[in-house]
Image (cartoon, rainbow, N blue to C red):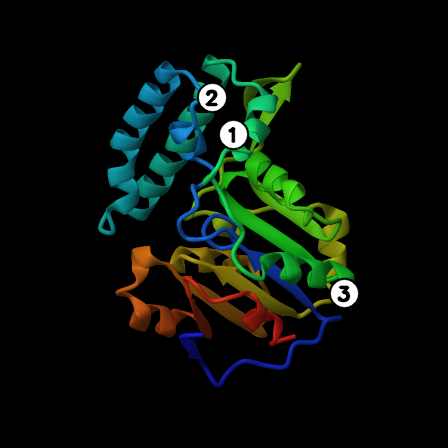
Amino acid sequence: MLYKSKSTFKINSDKVYVLADFNKTFTKGNSKTTWSIFATSNLFCEEYKKDRNELFNIYKPFEDDENLDYVIKKDKLSEWWKKHIELFTKYKISEDLFRKALEEENIMELRDGVKEFLEFLNKRNIPLIIVSQGIGNFAKAFLEMNNCYFNNIYITSNMVEFNNNIATGNVGDITHNLNKNEFTIPKHLKNSLDSRNQVVVIGDEINDLNMLKSIKTNQVIKIGILTKKHENELEKYKDNFDIVLSDIDSYKEILELF
């Protein structure tokens, strides 16, 4: 653990729920993101990879521009992810290929202690809401493959819709790192959260804290994972998170808070 503030509170398992990012948060820092899996897999045609890389070159500068108008940036990110999903339809990518891509070596790996953390949340009936700007189908399939996708987990993300095993578009709205506060959850889950006034939020980017903008409680523990991408921003992470873990720390350190 790189940092822990003095403002953290005692977590009550009956009163808490967890909000978490997925890419680089539950997966190791050297894992592929759910958007980049197809770019490195040999399962997909070169035409798809070419179009995918063209979109990346067009829209990545908008994502990285810290001075760009917020509204313009938000619209550009939504446009990017929507056009990427349209490529799945254009090249008739099948649902079967999603799982096959995940089975390839060096694609994704859970961070140390994540499986135990998810098992603990499930055992204690603590709701976990994963809010990801990635592809939710991949996140769900990856957790299933690792035997840690449980009934207490709800994923709100960019979901690809399939008809007869072929991609036909996206389900619902586009999620990216600027609109993570706009996620919606089913009524039955919302009702169960109404009795819980403590929140633990976990992410690897400061923008992941956007998830909290729709939360109506001040009992929040913010946990940041400092990946190599941001290794020179420790002080900034300490200013924004209550706890900062290194890229190699185990989730067992988070479990000790419960």
For the question of whether residue 32 can be seen, the reply is yes
Residue that numbered label 1 is attached to: 101
Image location (x, y in percent) of residue 203? 47, 58
Badge 3 marks a residue whose secondary structure is loop
> What residue appears at the point 70 percent right and 59 percent down from the top-left corner?
119
For the question of whether residue 171 can be seen, the reply is no
Q: Quadrant of the C terminus?
A: bottom right
Of residues 15 and 223, which is closer to you in this image?
A: 223
The 10 Å Cα crowd at callout 3, few under 14, some 14 to 19, many 20 or more, is few
Image location (x, y in percent) of residue 88? 48, 20
Three-letter amino acid code at the position of disc 3: Arg
Badge 2 marks a residue whose secondary structure is loop
Of residues 188 and 55, which is closer to you in this image?
A: 55
Three-letter amino acid code at the position of disc 1: Ala
Circles 1, 2 touching at the beta carbon (< 8 Å) = yes
Three-letter amino acid code at the position of disc 2: Leu
Residue that numbered label 3 is attached to: 124
Q: Which mark is first along the chain, 1 or 3?
A: 1
Q: Which mark is first along the chain, 2 or 3?
A: 2
Position of 232 with respect to 7 (left or right) is: left
Figure disc tally? 3
Residue that numbered label 2 is attached to: 43
The image shows residue 198, relative to residue 162, as above or below, that is: below
Residue 99 found in image quarter: top right
The image shows residue 68, relative to residue 226, as above or below, that is: above
The image shows residue 47, relative to residue 125, as above or below, that is: above
> What residue appears at the point 24 percent right and 39 percent down from the top-left corner?
61
Q: Which mark is first along the chain, 2 or 1?
A: 2
Distance between the Cα atoms at labels 3 and 1?
32 Å
Distance between the Cα atoms at labels 3 and 2?
39 Å
Q: Quadrant of the N terminus?
A: bottom left
Residue 125 found in image quarter: bottom right
